[in-house]
């Protein structure tokens, strides 16, 4: 049955593609945004800083897909940027909770983005599931506080699903674009030891997980949004170079050099773990792209 779906963060990489797929599916889509937008989806306005949201946004909404949040890797983690990353997630979710708590709506499902950064990502050989140990770094703290706010919405009797997202692969932006840049300049190389895992997912598979979470009312709680076969940083670099038909000439870039360049944000590329997709697969989801080479060949021109 087609639904009325309200999306936050709809202008981002995931939100743009998800809007397109949901529209093709026959669902009726609206966006919650800071600025009016043209297009097939109606836009309702909100101002997180002023704690304001258009009261009409929830009137006919069956499900909310919550993607809003400042980009984790868009800028270096200065003190002010770290505050922005945290507040954009916590405050936006709290504002939605407060609006839903008023009760003047028919929202039945709340599907939110989260991140695998909540886990203790350190050992390539350890399989990480939804019940694995949390980390104690900045990103883990952000995701834990974010999920605490999401969980409040479940106390309102609304079905809540949290998708802990890995590295999203898309030719239109995000991590893949940055990974391609040095390889295309013949400066590609593994980072650090090269043995840290990359838990990746094709953008379309991720969007289809969100769609399943909206449609399948048996889904509840947390699910990892990653493909079934994580690869090491070294394997990913070599595979990407092969798909781009570029050689890897340089040796691995030492971890200390990456830390000098990126500061604390270096953890994003120097740490990793084999994050499991078993739970979402057990729930009936079928991945279209299970091998990173197939995903890259689908995304990149040959």
Image: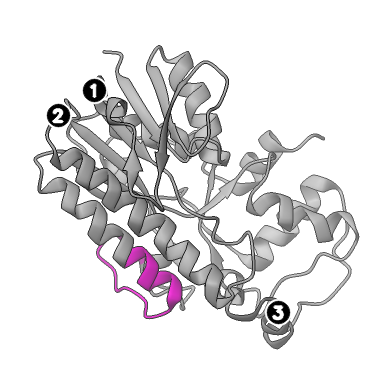
Q: Residue 129 lies in magenta, yes or no? A: yes
Q: Is residue 206 above or below residue 140?
A: above
- The image's mark for residue 258 is 3
Q: Residue 133 lies in magenta, yes or no? A: yes
Between 157 and 286, the residue placed more toward the observer is 157
Front disc: 3 or 2? 2
Tell me what residue is drawn at x 48 percent, y 63 percent: 85
Q: Which residue is mark 2?
A: 104
Element assignment for label 2: loop
Q: Is residue 132 above or below residue 263?
A: above
Q: Earlier in the sequence, mark 3 or mark 2?
A: 2
Q: Which residues are magenta?
A: 128-144
Q: Image quadrant of residue 106?
A: top left
Q: Image quadrant of residue 266?
A: bottom right
Front disc: 3 or 1? 1
Tell me what residue is drawn at x 89 percent, y 68 percent: 249
Between 137 and 39, the residue placed more toward the observer is 39
Is there any visible trace of residue 200 in the rendered image? Answer: yes
Q: Earlier in the sequence, mark 3 or mark 1?
A: 1
Labelled pair 3, 1 in contact (Cβ < 8 Å)? no
Labelled pair 2, 1 in contact (Cβ < 8 Å)? yes
Q: Which residue is mark 1?
A: 59
Position in image of residue 220 (x %, y %)? 19, 43
Element assignment for label 1: loop
Position in image of residue 122 (x %, y %)? 46, 78
Position in image of residue 257 (x %, y %)? 74, 84
Is there any visible trace of residue 289 in the rendered image? Answer: no
Q: Is residue 285 above or below residue 123?
A: above
């Amino acid at each position: 049955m087609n639904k009325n779906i309200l999306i936050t963060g709809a202008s981002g990489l995931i939100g743009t593609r998800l809007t397109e797929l949901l529209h093709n599916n026959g669902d009726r889509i609206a966006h919650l945004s800071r600025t009016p937008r043209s297009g097939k989806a109606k836009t309702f306005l909100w101002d997180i800083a002023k704690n304001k949201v258009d009261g009409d946004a929830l009137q006919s909404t069956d499900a909310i897909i919550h993607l809003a949040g400042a980009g984790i890797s868009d800028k270096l983690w200065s003190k002010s940027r770290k505050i922005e990353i945290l507040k954009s997630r916590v405050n936006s979710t709290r504002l939605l909770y407060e609006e839903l708590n008023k009760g003047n709506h028919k929202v039945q499902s709340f599907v939110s983005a989260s991140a695998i950064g909540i886990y203790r990502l350190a050992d390539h050989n350890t399989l990480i599931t939804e019940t694995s140990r949390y980390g104690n770094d900045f990103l883990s703290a952000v995701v834990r506080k974010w999920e605490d706010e999401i969980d409040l919405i479940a106390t309102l009797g609304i079905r809540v699903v949290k998708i802990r997202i890995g590295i999203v692969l898309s030719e239109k932006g995000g991590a893949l674009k940055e990974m391609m840049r040095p390889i295309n300049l013949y400066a590609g190389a593994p980072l650090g030891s090269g043995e840290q895992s990359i838990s990746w997912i094709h953008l379309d598979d991720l969007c289809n997980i969100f769609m399943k979470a909206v449609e399948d009312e048996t889904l509840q709680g947390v699910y990892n949004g990653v493909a079934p076969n994580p690869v090491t940083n070294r394997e990913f670099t070599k595979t990407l170079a092969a798909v781009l038909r570029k050689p890897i000439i340089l040796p691995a870039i030492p971890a200390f050099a990456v830390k000098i360049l990126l500061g604390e944000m270096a953890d994003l590329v120097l740490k990793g773990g084999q994050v499991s997709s078993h739970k979402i697969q057990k729930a009936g989801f079928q991945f279209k792209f299970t091998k990173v080479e197939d995903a890259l060949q689908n995304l990149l021109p040959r």
